[in-house]
Image (cartoon, rainbow, N blue to C red):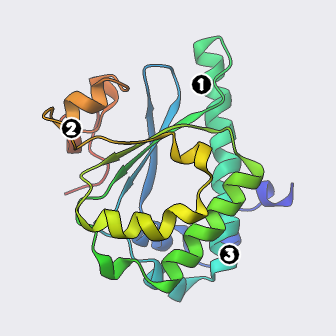
Amino acid sequence: DKIATLSADEVLGCSADLIDQHIPKWVRGRDRAGRPIQWTQWANVDVDAALEATTIERYLDYHVWKWVHMERALGAATRDAKRYVGKIVVVVDLDGMRLGQCTRAFYHMVRGIASIDGDNYPERLGQCLIVNAPRVFAVVWSGVSRFIDPATQRKLRILNSSGKSIVEQLSEVIDRSQIPQDYGGGAPPLSPG
């Protein structure tokens, strides 16, 4: 697979750091089952700004490139656990999400990512935990959900709908030592500041 031999900057045709500023994601820690965790924070997501530096096609290639690297994280998790670990956990923090972030480019990107994931990585998602979902999420979900396979939708769990704190709810799946300080855990914060 040629994409595995390229750097992130080569895949994107620009600085991956720049793209990651506009679409921030971190792979950090493992859940209680030993699965790697990908964290995403929506407060600074700006797909249109990211696409000023690259194209949607290159970003989708970058998504595949990240999956290639996630396979390495799964291999490390398997070695550490001394058993097969083939799924990841995704935590999506929607704090700060605004309807204005959900542009035509955003929906085009979501559709592309959903297609790639559904065609190539359908069983890699163990669970998706949504935290701090604002009311606008219901509107966005009605537009996005049609691109997402129903089996994948069943793996989604919204955490801020009960009386428990976010850290208490995350702790049901992730040990507090693996939860970033951003959410009340003991791991380093995801981003400075």
Task: Locate residue 183, reporting x and y percent.
Answer: 22, 41
Residue linked to disc 3: 58
Which is more toward the observer, 9 or 130? 130
Q: Which residue is drawn at 53% across and 83% down?
A: 51
Question: Which quadrant would residue 16 be assigned to in this image?
Answer: bottom right
174 lies left or right of 107: left
Residue type for callout 2: Ile
Q: Which residue type carries mark 3?
A: Arg
Left or right: residue 160 compared with residue 39 = left
Please indicate, yes or no, whether residue 14 appears anywhere in the rendered image: yes
Rendered-image quadrant of the N terminus: bottom right
> Residue 55 sits in which quadrant?
bottom right
Q: Is mark 1 on a helix, strand or loop?
A: helix
Q: Residue 166 carries which label?
A: 2
Residue pictured at 25% horizontal, 55% vertical: 192
Amino acid type, mark 1: Ala
Q: Earlier in the sequence, mark 2 or mark 3?
A: 3
Q: Residue furthest top?
A: 82
Q: Which of marks 3 and 1 is nearer the N terminus?
A: 3
Residue beneath disc 1: 77
Count residues near mark 2 (Cα–Cα under 10 Å), then give few for <14, some for 14-19, many for 20+.
some
Q: Which of marks 1 and 2 is nearer the N terminus?
A: 1
**C-alpha separation, residue under disc 2 versus residue under disc 3:** 35 Å
What's the distance in space between the residues labelled 3 and 1, CA to CA?
28 Å
Q: Is residue 28 above or below residue 132?
A: above
